[in-house]
Amino acid sequence: MSYVLGIDGGGSKTVCVLMDDSCQVLGRGEAGPSNYQSIGIEATLQSIQSAIHNAVEVTIIKNPVNIEAICLGLAGVGRAADIEVVKGLVQELQNNKSLPINWALQPANIVICNDALIALVGGIGQPVGIVVAAGTGSIVFGRNHQGHTKRVGGWGYIVGDEGSAYKIAVSGMNAALKYYDGREISTTLVEAFKQHLDLENIEDLIELIYRREWGVKQIAALAPIVDLAAASGDIVANTIIDDAVKELVKATSTIIDAIFNSDSVLEVVTTGSVWLGRCKIHERFVASLVNKFPKVNVIFPRDEPAYGAGLLALQTTQN
């Protein structure tokens, strides 16, 4: 019997699932990051190999496992040049004799795509709908029944990522410093940042952000400060959250207008840490979007992105 592999490769970890033709997951493995644009080709290959090995190792199937199809949904893979790079990685996987796998791959059974597509498929259970991802960064991606796709956002923290944890955190710090300057109305964010970061003065943010060269993830991790302030009724914090909601609703609406009918019965899956906040950002998003598109059903993920990758791989064996 042959099986398929679904791989979710991101900037923090790589997840691989081993799946049979009934969509049952028989093994699951994790490894390090696999965004080749940030860590390089060799490190990416090592992570993917490790995740596959870990998934196959825990299965009760007798080794070696016959693999008929594979889907790799990787962060940062969107251009033709990226796909060619990943094709090379797949060839390297097949040449690796240490993996307990019999490869039976044909070109049609190799799916290479961005991580937004597998998040959509895993979250909804089929490759039709919209995924609104709002974590450290943000991206909105949709696919209709005709196979047409549309992406909005995902341009990175410098020129994009509206509605992300990073942008919420930066807006919160900006508002706190404006109030400290006397340029903004009263906000509890000054004291909130001071307490959370153990600062004597809000000016000490400069030392953390610039002199210690905080990265995107460290800054994005401050978004819950804004969330808690908003949940406590802070006007400035709530304005920041409302602005994030507006951006995510606008991005989702753009996709609906582009590839769906405005009166379509449609599922929208929301993924990422931003949606788990205590200020009811998810409820605000749902209310605003459904007000514009009454037949839209907003859900949390039914399954993980790696499972979505497995479904896409399995689909190639059934055509």
Image (tube, rainbow, N blue to C red):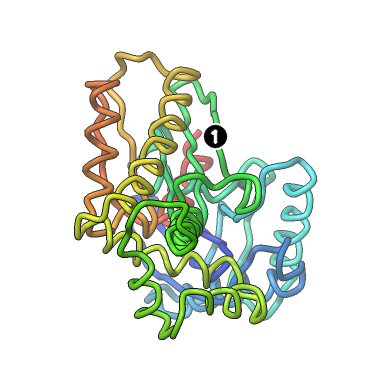
Q: Pick the quarter of the image with the N terminus.
A: bottom left
Would residue 15 be found to the left or right of residue 295 on screen? right
Q: Is residue 4 visible?
A: no
Q: Residue at x 45, y 76 (%)?
A: 62
Would residue 278 be found to the left or right of residue 38 on screen? left
Is residue 69 placed above or below 205 in the rendered structure?
A: above
Dot 1: what SS?
strand
Q: Position of residue 283 (x, y in %)?
A: 21, 43
Going by the numbered disc 1, the residue's amino acid type is: Val
Q: Position of residue 81 (x, y in %)?
A: 80, 45
Q: Position of residue 261 (x, y in %)?
A: 38, 14
Q: Residue at x 54, y 63 (%)?
A: 66
- Counting labels gives 1
Assess disc 1: are there few (<14), some (14-19) or many (≥20) residues with their C-alpha within 10 Å of its C-alpha.
many
Q: Position of residue 154 (x, y in %)?
A: 58, 45
Q: Residue at x 42, y 18 (%)?
A: 260
* Along the viewing direction, whichever of 52 and 189 lies nearer the viewer: 189
- The residue indicated by pointer 1 is 152
